Amino acid sequence: MALVWAAGWIALTAQVVWGQGVVQTLLGTLSGAAVLVPVLLAWMFPRFGGLVLVGLGVCVKLWADSQTAIVGLAVPGVALGTAFLLLGASAAFQRWRTRRKALKIARTLDRS
């Protein structure tokens, strides 16, 4: 879901700058692609990345002029950020992460 939301954000940014010249179109699309950073951050560090996505959604709400932009960009950002926050705080995720680290250490010890 987070990648779909990021793709929508990039598409909206590209649509806004489309036809303004090659340099402006490229820079606008790349600036829209910057939304992938918080999404990947949320995948790696769910609690911190979730906070970043919630903040990004709130900033979009303050910036957006139309209800469509708010519903399409701000609400999913806040919802995904909240979901990542809950995931990062869940005991099941913490157990999974601990097992993953333990397996990584065991593999390293096996190789040496």
Image: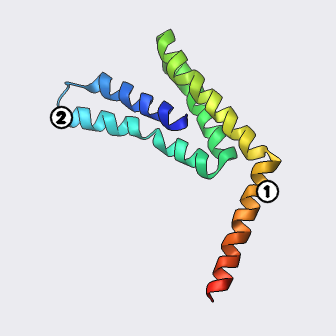
Instruction: Residue 20: give x, y in percent of width and height.
Output: 20, 25
Rendered-image quadrant of the N terminus = top right
Q: Secondary structure at mark 2?
A: helix
Quadrant of the image containing the C terminus: bottom right
Query: Tags 1 and 2 in contact by the CB under 8 Å rule?
Result: no
Instruction: Give the colour scheme of this rendering.
Output: rainbow
Q: Residue furthest top?
A: 67
On screen, residue 104 versus residue 10, left or right, reads right
Taking the image as shown, residue 77 lies to the left or right of residue 97, namely left
**Mark 1 and mark 2: span between their CA atoms?**
49 Å
Graded by Cα atoms within 10 Å as few (under 14), some (14 to 19) or many (20 or more), the crowding at tag 1 reads: few
**Residue 7 at x, y = what percent?**
43, 33
Q: Secondary structure at mark 1?
A: helix
Residue drawn at x 79%, y 45% as measured from the top left: 90
**Closer to the camera, 75 or 58?**
75
Q: Is residue 87 left or right of residue 21?
A: right
Tell me where residue 2 appears, x and y as whole percent. Answer: 54, 36
Amino acid type of the residue tagged 2 in the rendering: Val
Label 2 Cα crowd, 10 Å radius (few <14 / some 14-19 / many 20+): few
The image quarter containing residue 33 is top left
Depth check, mark 1 against mark 2: the one in front is 1
Dot 1 amino acid type:
Arg
Q: Residue at x 36, y 28 (%)?
A: 11
Compare marks 1 and 2 and give the one earlier in the sequence.
Answer: 2
Instruction: Give above or below for 76 relative to 91.
Output: above
Reading the image, the residue beneath label 2 is 22
Residue at image point 43% right, 28% down: 8
Identify residue for label 1. Answer: 95
Q: Is residue 107 left or right of residue 73?
A: right
Residue 78: x and y in percent read 63, 28
